Image (cartoon, rainbow, N blue to C red):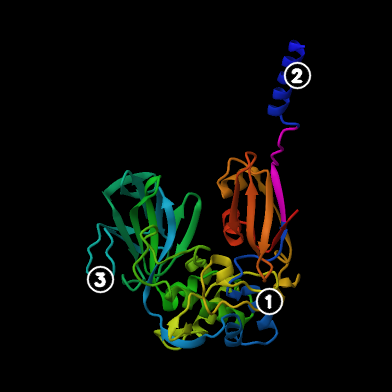
Amino acid sequence: MRISKTLFTAFILLFSITPAHAVEIPAVFNFQGTGYGHGVGLSQIGARGKALAGESAQAILNYYYSGTQILPLADNQNVRVNIGHLLTQASIKSGTKDSILNVYTGDVGESLTAVPAASLTWKSAISFVQLGTSISAFIVTGKNSQLLGTNSAWSVRWSGTRYLDGAASTVSLRVNSKSVKYRYGQIQIKSVKAPIIGHRMEVTNTVRIHDEYLYGISEVPSSWPTQALIAQAIASRSYVLSKLGVPRVACDCNVYNSISDQSFVGFSKEIEPIYGKLWKEAVQASSTSETTGQVITINGSPITAYFFSSSGGQTETSVNAWGQERSFTTSVADPYSQDPILNPRFFTWSRPLTQAVLARTFSLADVVALNIDSRNPTGTVARISATSSDGKITTLRGETFRSRTQLPSAWFNLI
């Protein structure tokens, strides 16, 4: 009897610590949705649809930015645009025969009396390499390389800009295998301390907003209707004016050249085959003088004119997306985003997300289950939670989840 009781107890203990079945950890979760972007402010597909229907740029902007006024404001200020983030190496070369490339030690700012450390012909390039806390500059001619010096910051100017006389020329910034052309302003290369990884190079292009910056904005195709292009030019001008001030330390910039702010591709936009001139004309059409342009305002000040590609049929508010109140981001109907002809890529979409991506997104060891806890009135996911195999649950705002996973939008369902 004693032996039987012992065996029975061992059996109960063994049963209690052995799960009936192992918890399955899915390799992939699948999502289906509509729209592209955060959904706040101007819908670019919506603007295109409205322009095709005959609406003016001003009417389009008044619709998407509630309670605002479009006023002429000064836009001849300089803006510092980050065109290379967290780099260890980059090179700059003139793209125009017989042009001059001047390289300066330090950040020379707006000085017109700065003396260059080197003046290069169009046959030579300047290569910058992050070494420790400083940046070494090398003059490269053919297969030969010569050290120019080492410093925490460098500046580059080229002939044809307002900083340096001569025939108009361009330069190419090469990072890895990609080159982008720039024509205006000057370029700065600065060593900045980044969290965890140490010092890295931040490369910026200082340009005048009125033309030099806006000519390089590449947010929508230049082939779009004129009034949609003008609406985008005004929104882009308004956005960048709202970002002026002391440059951000992390990027040595006022704005990034990417979706963190707005896409800026320099001279590459202006020289697009056939249609590049149409974008330039739209920027000029949104100007009101040589030093002013149309700006979306509240109480006479530029708004941070958010914009995005397309929605789920209703634009989002900044409160729903980011938890921040912006009076001009009321939700409005956006039916053109749901037109498969106008929005063929994102009228509907499907995406898989791997286990690794989701675990990192929620800061969990793994993810065994996802649940959409709530939705906003616009249809976007308000809250989404993940459960790990050890029972931990983490909840995120829908827009935060979208941003971290790079899903096209927060208008999505779990499949």
Which residue is at the front of the view, 323 or 216?
323
Main secondary-structure element of the magenta-colored stretch: loop
Measured from the top left, where is residue 87 in percent x and y? 42, 50
The disc label shown at residue 334, or none: 1
Residue 222 visible, this angle = yes
Residue count near mark 1 (Cα–Cα under 10 Å), binned few <14, some 14–19, many ≥20: many
- Residue that numbered label 3 is attached to: 112
Say which amino acid is labelled 1. Answer: Asp
Disc 2, SS: helix
- Residue that numbered label 2 is attached to: 8
The disc label shown at residue 5, or none: none
Judge depth for marks 3 and 1 and give the one in front: 1
What separation in Å lies between label 2 and label 3 (alpha carbons)?
A: 92 Å
Left or right: 278 as drawn, with respect to 85: right
What separation in Å lies between label 3 and label 1 (alpha carbons)?
A: 49 Å
State the residue lying farthest toward the front.
Answer: 1
Identified at 53% across, 79% down, the residue is: 327
Dot placed on the residue nearer the N-terminal end, 1 or 2? 2
Identified at 51% across, 87% down, the residue is: 69
> What segment carries the magenta color?
21-31
Left or right: 338 as drawn, with respect to 174: right
**Does residue 188 lie above or below 195 as drawn?**
below
Dot placed on the residue nearer the N-terminal end, 3 or 1? 3
